[in-house]
Image: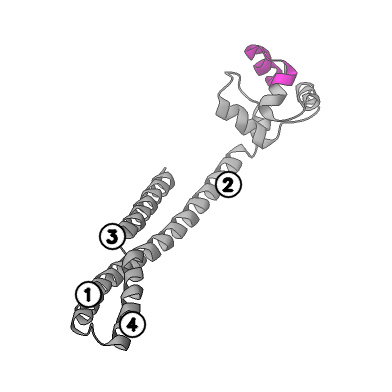
Amino acid sequence: MNYLKEIRLELGLTQAAMADILCISRANISLVEADMRKLSSDNLVKLRKLKMHSVQIPAEEMDGMEELVQNRKMELKRHLEMQIEQIEVKLSKAEKTLEIMTRKFTASCEALKLIRRELKIFAGVEDYEKRLNEQLNIQKKIYIDNHPSARLIHELNILALKSNLELFRQQLAL
């Protein structure tokens, strides 16, 4: 009896049900069971992964299986390495941005103090007061844009990037 038919019958599946599992047509199942066609390596991998059977798949059907599995592992490894590189770049940029935000916030706080002090001193000089008020508004915007709450969001983004990086490195190690 054909190994696929033996597996299918052992599981109590119809040809249509087995075709659904393997994502091929019922007619192809029929041809494989009649030994007129072989299952693709992908479908042999599916059978193996599902661990649906205790029947030994013939050696001639397994030709190239190990190579296919090794190729897929290498593809996954390359994909993970690329993702790690991309996350490392994003993380580096995010950390630099956070440093810049912190410096801008600190400088903005100092500028606001100076402007407020000058406003008190030169409150009577009309043009000077107008110019200082404009500077005050600019510094307020910088202050808000780089406020600790904005930095906190950025820090959370950095933590998420670090977590993703660690997960991908763990997957790569498997």
Say which residue label 1 marks. 110
Residue at image coords 49%, 57%:
82
Render colour scheme: one colour
Quick one: label 2 or label 1, which is nearer the N terminus? 2
| 92 with respect to 103 (left or right) | right
Residue at image coords 36%, 65%:
145
Three-letter residue code for mark 4: Lys
- SS for dot 3: helix
Mark 1: give few (<14), some (14-19) or many (20+) Cα within 10 Å: few
Please name which of the two marks, 2 or 1, marks the residue nearer to the observer.
Answer: 1
Queried whether the magenta region covers residue 15, the answer comes back as yes
Q: Which residues are magenta?
A: 2-17
Question: Gap between marks 2 and 1, in whole Å?
Answer: 59 Å
- Number of marks in the image? 4
Q: Position of residue 144 (x, y in %)?
A: 33, 64
Which label belongs to residue 71?
Answer: 2
